[in-house]
Image: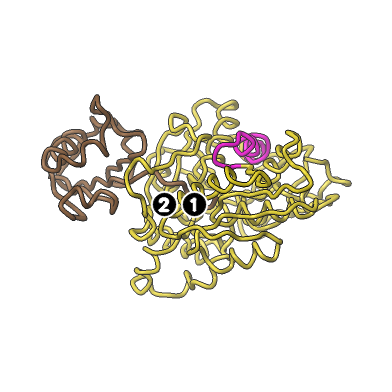
Chain colours: A yellow, B brown
């Protein structure tokens, strides 16, 4: 990551309650830019996201719960970090030629981030996307110049991965960064997200994030445990809707190559309804507008908080709520949404 | 008796049922009971030596049993066991 041209200003302390600075702890990222500095390009502005205490979402008064707000990244999600590392890896390994088309299976965020970064360098980007993701993700992909290849929605991300692999095997122009198996994915979190968390919150006892590719949990987990081997690492996993489990057998299941289950301390299954309830509570009580997986991560974080006698938890909120507005997640009665919740890829 | 939720991919081998109630003091015993009633499930769920298939995730009350006591995790009357195929996660 390039250094900013001038040092970033320190953020003003909150006027509505205790802040990190009010606690007398050193400010985040000493020697590195805080969120909101001056950068030579949008890609250099990736990361440096704020860590915000959210006490109203913490069920244990002896536990402090902080949210890492990844929705403030340039394209609105944590995947900006990963896409930058994936693209740099493609360049460094010499896999990109003048006719190359970067192809990636994605439920949206990685594709949006990859398109933003790679198109700036003149590369074509194509994404394999389940055909039942929210409209905003399609629109953003188009805005950032990605070409969309639909995969069957009922097969979820598994179907997108399988189709992308088939396309790459058939056409040598396709170059796949492959976030599910590329060590550059967890490396992005080891070198950026984990470092920022330690700088902002060195006392962290537990880290919680959505499972996804496993990159966040693997990379952040490794970095945090280098500082404190006792840090607990916990995953929130979506309970897939009935209509998006289109597998023929359990052997069609998929475990990302970069994911090592032995590195976790726990994994919680979270339903879409639970995730949306938490999402609404986050907005109502803490004024934070986040995406569906953030709600799920909060449900898991609350479970971890109940088990701790005391301590500090950092939960990563992977994106903002903007890409879910068309589905009225914040306004429709949950019982009216039952069919939609079963039939869409929300995360 | 624990309630065991069967994913769509396994229902044909479980008499079309979405949920079955099975006795057993551990998750392993419950799964043994399940596959003895529905033998077609054995190959999908368990390895030859009786362990969990790599692509099968089993949750006791929403927590992955790999982080509890695996198949030896105690199971009781009010527990729900969820069986799911490993899926590529979201937000990817």
Left or right relative to B49: residue A191: right
Left or right relative to A83: residue B58: left
Chain of the residue on which disc 1 is drawn: B
Residue A100: x percent and y percent? 72, 47
Where residue A7 sits, quadrant-wise, is top right
Q: Main secondary structure of the magenta part?
A: helix
Left or right relative to A137: residue B82: left
Instruction: Identify the residue position indicated by label 1 in the image.
Output: B90
Work out how far the residue at label 2 is from the one at label 1, CA to CA, in angstroms.
Answer: 8 Å
Are there few (<14), some (14-19), or many (20+) residues within 10 Å of tag 1?
A: many
Residue B74: x percent and y percent? 21, 35
Observer-nearest of B30 and A147: A147
Q: Are marks 2 and 1 in contact (CB under 8 Å)?
A: yes
Left or right relative to A74: residue B35: left
> In the rendered structure, does residue A158 fall within the stretch colored magenta?
no
Q: Is residue A341 above or below residue A206?
A: below
> In the rendered structure, does residue A193 fall within the stretch colored magenta?
yes
Observer-nearest of A298 and B91: B91
Chain of the residue on which disc 2 is drawn: A
Mark 1 element type = loop
- The residue under the point 59% across, 45% down is A168
Q: Quadrant of the N terminus of chain A?
A: top right
Q: Is residue A198 above or below residue A165?
A: above
Marker disc for residue A238: 2
Observer-nearest of A151 and A37: A151
Residue B42: x percent and y percent? 21, 37
- Number of marks in the image? 2
């Amino acid at each position: 990551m390039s250094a900013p041209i001038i040092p970033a200003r320190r953020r003003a302390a909150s006027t509505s309650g205790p802040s990190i600075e009010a606690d007398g702890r050193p400010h985040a990222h000493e020697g590195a830019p805080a969120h909101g500095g001056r950068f030579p390009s949008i890609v250099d502005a990736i990361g440096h996201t704020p860590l915000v205490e959210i006490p109203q979402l913490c069920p244990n008064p002896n536990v402090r719960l902080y949210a890492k707000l990844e929705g403030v990244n340039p394209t609105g999600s944590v995947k900006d970090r990963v896409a930058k590392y994936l693209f740099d890896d493609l360049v460094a390994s010499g896999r990109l030629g003048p006719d190359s088309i970067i192809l990636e299976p994605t439920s949206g965020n990685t594709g949006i981030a990859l398109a933003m970064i790679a198109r700036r360098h003149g590369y074509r980007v194509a994404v394999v996307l389940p055909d039942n993701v929210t409209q905003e993700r399609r629109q953003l992909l188009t805005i950032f110049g990605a070409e969309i290849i639909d995969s069957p929605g009922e097969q979820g991300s598994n179907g997108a991965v399988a189709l992308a692999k088939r396309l790459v095997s058939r056409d040598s122009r396709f170059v796949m960064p492959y976030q599910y198996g590329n060590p550059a994915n967890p490396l992005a979190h080891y070198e950026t997200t984990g470092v920022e968390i330690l700088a902002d919150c060195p006392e962290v006892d537990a880290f919680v994030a959505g499972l996804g590719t496993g990159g966040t949990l693997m990379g952040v987990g490794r970095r945090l445990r280098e500082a404190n081997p006792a840090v607990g690492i916990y995953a929130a996993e979506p309970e897939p809707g009935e209509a998006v489990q289109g597998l023929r057998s359990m052997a069609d299941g998929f475990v990302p190559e970069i994911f090592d289950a032995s590195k976790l301390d726990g994994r919680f299954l979270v339903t879409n309804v639970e995730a949306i309830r938490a999402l609404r509570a986050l907005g109502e009580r803490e004024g934070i507008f986040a995406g569906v997986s953030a709600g799920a991560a909060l449900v898991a974080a609350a479970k971890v908080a109940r088990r701790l006698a005391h301590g500090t938890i950092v939960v990563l909120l992977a994106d903002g709520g903007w890409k879910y507005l068309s589905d009225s997640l914040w306004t429709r009665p949950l019982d009216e949404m039952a069919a939609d919740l079963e039939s869409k890829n929300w995360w | 008796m624990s309630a065991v939720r069967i994913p769509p991919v396994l229902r044909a081998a479980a008499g079309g049922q979405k949920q079955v109630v099975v006795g057993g003091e551990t998750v392993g015993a419950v799964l043994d009971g399940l596959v003895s009633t529905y033998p077609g499930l054995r190959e999908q769920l368990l390895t030859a030596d009786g362990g969990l298939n790599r692509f099968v995730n089993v949750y006791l009350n929403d927590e992955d049993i790999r982080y509890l006591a695996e198949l030896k995790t105690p199971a009781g009357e009010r527990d729900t066991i969820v069986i799911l195929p490993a899926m590529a996660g979201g937000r990817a």
